[in-house]
Image (cartoon, rainbow, N blue to C red):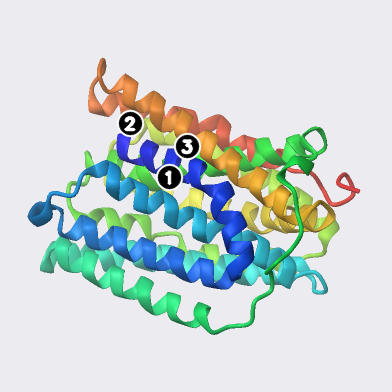
Amino acid sequence: MAYFMLASVFWGITQAPILRWSNRIGFNKAMGLGLLGEGLQILMLATITHYHWPLWLIALVWGVAISLYWPQLRANFTRSLLHRKVSPAVGMSSALLMLSLGVAPAIGGVIASWLGITLLYVIAMLCFAAAAAPLFTGKELIQHEEYSLRGIPWRKIWRDLIANMGSEVDAAIAANVWPLFIFLIVPTYAGVGFLSSMAVIASIIIAFYVGQRKQKEITGYLKNGAGVIGLTNAIRLVTQSVGQIAGINFFNGLGQAIAVTPFYSRYYQNAEREPLLPYVYAMQMTCVVGDVAVFGLLVLLSFVVSVKAVLAIGLIIAIPAGFLIRLIRTPKDSN
């Protein structure tokens, strides 16, 4: 938890200067460097027993990599959709993301169990490097764009900020706390990986379906999806068996698939109507604040309660976070 908190702190500290630097060299190149940074983080984790890297240094590499990649990705995606229908593109992107997130735990779990976690790290590092290569030669959508971070319309976009923080906290808990909680019940890499992959096929189909709906129709999907996410986050607390974990993963995945397309459709449409880079910066900083607050709290609690209690409290925090997703403004509200 301290590692995740430190990475988020470094992310927040480096985001503003890296955003300015990326604007000079081009956002694609910055994203490529971010992916290489992710690969370097993996390499350092893989060799930590040999070189004894301090965790704060690995967290610094990770935080810088996030600053190089995610704000630029959000801004680039917004700019690329300025003259296109947003929902279908977001639905396609969401489906591909769910496919990768669903397949990765199963494949990674098998590799880690059969061949060792070190080899898994090496393979992951190579994948990051392969993904970064095209970004250094592709056309730049954003470069040398005038902007000022002082122009952030805080009062106008506060609902977006809270919704985005809720989305980030929910994702952080799902990625970093829930798998550890599962591990207490299913103590194998392969078991955890396969259980995390249960909802992939259904989620991909739903993401495609929602992406084809008209803008007016997806508001209900966002509310219903956020409700399913919040409910399954609550049910996680009483999980006791492999079957229950599989069911929770399945229905939470369905909720994510229903909510993710309308949420990010609104995100990108609202970004289009605001000063782009200041808006993206503010949204990313809410992610930083949410992550630092959550993991900082869990670190403090780890000194006074058991590991299982710490993880359970993290799951409790995810319950309201899942419901906050529905607060993001509609394009009509953002005019």
Q: Is residue 173 above or below residue 39?
A: above
Q: Which residue is mark 2?
A: 311
Task: Specify the label residue 291 is tagged with.
Answer: 3
Residue 171 drawn at (x, y percent): 49, 46
Residue beneath the point at 56% across and 68% down: 95
Name the amino acid type tagged 1.
Ala
Task: Specify the label residue 202 is tagged with.
Answer: none
Task: Specify the label residue 174 is tagged with.
Answer: 1
- Can residue 12 be seen in the rendering of this structure? yes
Q: Who comes first in sequence, dot 1 or dot 3?
A: 1
- Observer-side mark, 1 or 3, equals 3
Is 218 or 139 nearer to us in this picture? 139
Element under disc 2 = helix
In the picture, the quarter occupied by the N terminus is top left
Residue beneath the point at 11% across and 54% down: 51
- Observer-side mark, 3 or 2, equals 3
Within 10 Å of disc 2 (Cα), the crowding (few <14, some 14-19, many 20+) is many
- Could you tell me if the residues under marks 3 and 2 are in contact, i.e. CB atoms within 8 Å? no
Residue 224 drawn at (x, y percent): 67, 45
